[in-house]
Amino acid sequence: KDNAPAILQVHTYRFNGHSPADPEHERGRKEEKAWARQAQDPIKGFEDKWIAAGMFTEEELKEARKEVLADVKKSVEFADKSPMPPVELAKELEFPDAPDTDYNLREGPAFADEVNARTISPEKMKVVQDHIAALRAKAEAGEISIGDAINLAIHEEMLRDPTTTIHA
């Protein structure tokens, strides 16, 4: 739709409770967990979709998973051995850039174009680029809504850096 923000709503299955006070036995249904892992796991869905499309091979994804798990293991070991960070660091990490940072000048990662080319078809990329151009035209004319401005920023940033995540 025009003039409306884009929202991604994700439905997930909770395998465990929120905390140790939320008992696991309430979620211990084996059949439900098996169903969730087989039919609802977004990582498995991603892998199945892109293997079927010929984008990745099972071996490529297996190797990527192995590398990621090794990185995670090293990171956890490092964190466990490290002292607690100073409390002031939280504020620095929340606002890491100078107030006058021009994000339009920030280069994306070296792999961004390759990832975008592998995951966005030329037809869909044209739709995205046309949408971005229309939103930029609204902005230049001073007629952009806050929803469209957010939508534009999200589209531009996710193309610039495909590792971008959004937390709400």
Image (cartoon, grey):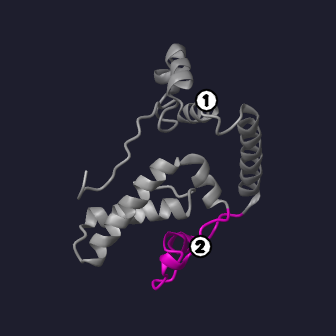
Q: Residue furthest top?
A: 31
Neighbor class of circle 2 (other Cα within 10 Å; few <14, some 14-19, many 20+) is few
Confirm whether residue 167 shows in the render: no
Q: CA distance from mark 1 to mark 2?
A: 32 Å
Q: Determine which of the numbered discs, if any, sits on residue 107 in the image.
A: 2
Tell me which corner region of the image, top left, top right, bottom left or bottom right, holds residue 149. Answer: bottom left
Residue 104 on image: x %, y %: 48, 76
Q: Which residue position is annotated with label 1? A: 52
- Is 21 a magenta residue? no
- The three-letter amino acid code for the residue at tag 1 is Ala
The circle drawn on residue 16 is: none
Contact between marks 1 and 2 (CB within 8 A): the answer is: no
**In terms of secondary structure, what is the magenta stretch mainly?**
loop
Residue 87 among magenta residues: yes
Q: Residue at x 54, y 30 (%)?
A: 41
Badge 1 element:
helix
Going by the numbered disc 2, the residue's amino acid type is Glu
* Closer-to-camera residue (86/43): 43
Observer-nearest residue: 25 or 74? 74
Mark 1 or mark 2, which has the lower sequence index? 1
Q: Vertically, is 38 above or below 62?
A: above
Q: Dot 1: few (<14), some (14–19), or many (≥20) neighbours within 10 Å?
A: few
Percent position of residue 13, x then y: 46, 30
**Residue 114, image x, y percentages:** 64, 56
Identify whether 141 is placed above or below 42: below
Which residues make up the magenta segment?
Answer: 83-110
Instruction: Please give the name of the residue rendered at 24% of the width and 77% of the height, measured from the top-left corner.
Output: 142
